[in-house]
Amino acid sequence: MIVVLAWRLHTWPAQRDHAAPLRQLTIAAVVLAALAARFGLPDNPDAVTAPATLMGDCRLLSAASI
């Protein structure tokens, strides 16, 4: 999802003839925000009791439905 957002933020200003440094700065901001969200959010305190294969299948099916 972050990649799609970064791509859209790169192509949208390019269509409006904005300078390349502005587009690069917006992509850098998206990547930094994603990293901050990834490492800044706390861990899940609840124990996961579901089998790993169930979780993996669910993620694959969710990705396939997009």
Image: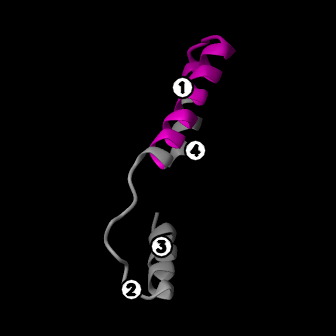
The residue beneath circle 1 is: 12
Kindly indicate whether the residue at mark 1 contacts the one at mark 3 (C-beta within 8 angstroms): no
Mark 3 vs mark 1, foreground winner is 3
* Mark seen at residue 39: none
SS of the residue at dot 4? helix
What amino acid is labelled 2 in the image?
A: Ala
- Residue at left 47%, top 73%? 59
Q: CA distance from mark 3 to mark 4?
A: 18 Å
Mark 2 vs mark 4, foreground winner is 2
SS of the residue at dot 1? helix
The residue beneath circle 4 is: 3
The residue beneath circle 2 is: 50
- Residue at left 40%, top 49%? 41
**Mark 3 or mark 4, earlier in chain:** 4
- The answer to whether any part of residue 25 appears in the image is yes
**Mark 3 or mark 1, earlier in chain:** 1
Q: CA distance from mark 2 to mark 4?
A: 29 Å
Examine the image and state in which quarter residue 7 appears.
Answer: top right
What scheme was used to colour the molecule? Answer: one colour
Kindly indicate whether the residue at mark 4 contacts the one at mark 2 (C-beta within 8 angstroms): no
SS of the residue at dot 2? loop
Image height check: is 53 above or below 18? below
What amino acid is labelled 1 in the image?
A: Trp
SS of the residue at dot 3? helix
The residue beneath circle 3 is: 59
Mark 4 vs mark 1, foreground winner is 4
Local crowd size for mark 1, using a 10 Å CA cut-off: few (<14), some (14–19), many (≥20) = few
Asked whether residue 27 is drawn in magenta, I would say yes
Mark 2 vs mark 1, foreground winner is 2
Local crowd size for mark 2, using a 10 Å CA cut-off: few (<14), some (14–19), many (≥20) = few
